[in-house]
Image (cartoon, rainbow, N blue to C red):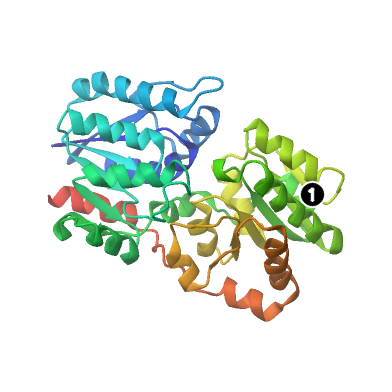
Amino acid sequence: MKKIMLVFGTRPEAIKMCPLVNELKARPEFDVGVCVTGQHREMLEQVLRVFGVEPDYDMSIMKSGQTLFDITSLVLLGMKEILEDFEPDIVLVHGDTTTSFAAALACFYLQIPIGHVEAGLRTYNLKSPFPEEFNRQAVDLITNLYFAPTEQSRQNLLKEGRDPQSIFVTGNTGIDALATTVRDDYENEHLEWAKESRLILITAHRRENLGEPMHCMFRAIRRLMDERDDLKAIYPIHMNPLVREAAHAELDGCDRIKLIEPLEVLDFHNFLAASHLILTDSGGIQEEAPSLGKPVLVMRDTTERPEGVAAGTLRLVGTSEEEIYKQASRLLDDEAAYAEMSHASNPYGDGTASRQISDILANL
């Protein structure tokens, strides 16, 4: 029986790892252990509840005012005892979080094989996104099995000299999650408030956008809303106090913009499904929204998901107020432009990534 441990610590990781946890646990050939670091706390627990995942190990590292130094050192030190207790044959980490980097480093020190889910994403700019670009490159440097979501990700790994036999293109496990969460009979008071309007869903939180870039983003959104009476916008606002300060400064006072608390994953995916347009600086949404036929404007200067841009499902608009306003206005006012983006093909998989990864692990 193969002993497999999955380690994750943030809400986005949990959304993408829980479908894989459940797929692996459904197979008798695997002994599965789940370790959560608690890099996020309440938001992480919400996702675990939705997918019915009970951690075997919970490091609970989150503390007020935590820094990258705190996360890295606490995860690295805490993982040693957990890995020595469970003795996994392989550890699976996800994506580009500091949890993934520190957990992978602990495995490397103990010479435990690493499987990287969502391997090979790149901007090749270590400052954007920060620190995620460093984290994913560092993890891929010491990974043994690469589960790349797309052919482009595979090509990135090959260019870096990774063994072709260790790279598998599986699609993205985040698409698997949508099959569990999006429901035809879903109801919510906020969506009821917006049901007669075209809904814009906003997410914004990236470190590199804090300060003036984020104010520019929100000012562009406010202009869009002030000029179009048929729009409503919902922003599940991030917990970061700097994000909240900027959002309230630029968006307060418009009765067609709702700032609400962060949503559980089931709610958020159904908000995506009900939206007309997504404005985001997030990562996973760039994969999820196109699966639902929703155009996405990415308020960042770089993206590690160029496949979506090439396919026409995403458009990179930066953080300039004028550019965000111009590109969003085009989609809101030009039906042909909107239809072109909403009907573009999704390059991020067909919802079978967890099954494919489990098959690969079973056949090793």
Quick one: 56 or 85, which is closer to the camera?
A: 85
Residue 204 in the image: x percent, y percent?
A: 62, 46
Image quadrant where residue 121 sits: bottom left
Q: Classify 247 as above or below 119.
A: above
Q: Which residue is mark 1?
A: 257
Residue 191 visible within the image: no
Residue 356: x and y in percent read 27, 56
Q: Position of residue 166 (x, y in %)?
A: 17, 54
In the picture, the quarter occupied by the N terminus is top left
Q: Quadrant of residue 329?
A: bottom right
Residue 327 appears at what percent x and percent y? 67, 68
Q: Is residue 325 above or below residue 262?
A: below
Foreground pick, 233 / 63: 63
- How many numbered callouts? 1
Residue appearing at x 33%, y 36% in the figure:
101
Name which residue type carries label 1: Ile
Residue at the spot 17% in from the left edge and 48% down from the top edge: 362
State left or right for residue 104 relative to residue 175. left
64 and 23: which one is in front?
64
Q: Up-down: is 287 above or below 1?
A: below
- Asked whether residue 232 appears in the rendered view, the answer is yes
Would you place residue 118 above or below residue 334 in this image?
Answer: above
Is the residue marked by circle 1 packed among few (<14), some (14-19), or many (20+) residues within 10 Å?
A: many
Left or right side of 276 for 71: left
Q: Which residue is found at the position 65% from the left and 74% from the top? A: 338
Which residue is rendered at x = 24% and y = 49% of the image?
A: 358
Helix, strand or loop at label 1? It is strand
